[in-house]
Amino acid sequence: MNKPIILGMFDSGVGGLTVAHAIRQRMPNINLLYYGDTLHLPYGDKGPETLQAYSRTIGRYLLSRGADLLLIACNSASAYAYDAVRVIDSQKPTLDVIRPVVQHLGNTWPKGTIGVIGTRATIRSNIYTQLLHMQFPQIKVKALATPLLAPFAEEGIEDPQLRSALVAHYLKQPELQEIDALVLACTHYPLLKKEIRAQLPSHTQIVDPAEILALELQNRLPALEGQSHMECLVSEWTPAFAQAAQLMFGENLEVKQHNIHPGT
Ligand code: DGL
């Protein structure tokens, strides 16, 4: 039997759970060690140095706990801290939620127009345009920061009218018209996928990084056997996080508070 593989992954909060869920669907035997940095939510309003410092601390912690590979399950951190995390241990692979998506976009719509919605940090970084244009210069990118969506999704607000109104407010902006695909460039946004789908014309496809990352991992890792395990830690226990985690992974998943940040 293969030695169990531990995937260490993190996000500011519940967003990365959408990626964990997609991975679990494809690879039910994977061991996940998840860290939600709820103490520092939202990541989308933080600057590059802050995101690098948080990501480094979490990356080191996950490796110290035996992670065999790391996944930055947050676009804002992927935009600014991919290199900072990658160099912690160059023997252990680091994946992020942007680079595999860029590849998928280029392969699928090499001359298309791609809409990108994300946090202020992700959109300000201009990372999608930069990475896409390095390989696929004919792709056109239309990007819009949608800063209220992540805190809204984190809170787990269920009111259907409120959810639709907020999503509609952003998606009707002129920046997002006439697009072939819309990238949910924040891992919190798949939690609003139903409302996003309802607002888009039928020819516009939704690109969910969670699904692309799950496929990427399945292609990279050997077939796994044995029992799977998921450990879920947060820097600050919140009822919203615990509820979202249990909704997605079942009542047995215990969310534990474990603050690893120095000086907090
Ligand atoms: N889920 C994260 C992202 O993909 C961060 C959202 C936030 O904390 O602002 O960008």
Image (cartoon, grey):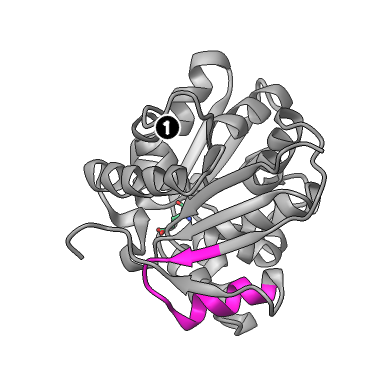
Residue 185 visible to an observer of this rendering: no
Q: Residue at x 69, y 27 (%)?
A: 109
In the image, taking residue 163 as reference, residue 226 lies left or right, namely right
Q: Position of residue 60 (x, y in %)?
A: 37, 43
Which range is magenta? 232-247
Residue placed at 66% from the left, 67% from the top?
195
| Residue 241 is a magenta residue | yes
Q: Position of residue 255 (x, y in %)?
A: 53, 73
Tell me where residue 244 appears, x and y as whole percent: 59, 74
Q: Quadrant location of the C terminus?
A: bottom left
Q: Is residue 80 above or below residue 110?
A: below
Disc 1 marks which amino acid?
Ile
Quadrant hosting residue 182 = top right
Q: Which residue is mark 1?
A: 127
Q: Nearer the viewer, residue 168 or 23?
A: 23
For label 1, being within 8 Å of ligand 1 is answered no
**What is the quadrant of the N terminus in the image?**
top right
- Please check the rendered image and state whether residue 89 is part of the magenta-colored stretch, yes or no: no
Along the line of sight, the residue nearer the viewer: 63 or 220: 63
User: Residue at left 48%, top 52%?
Assistant: 10
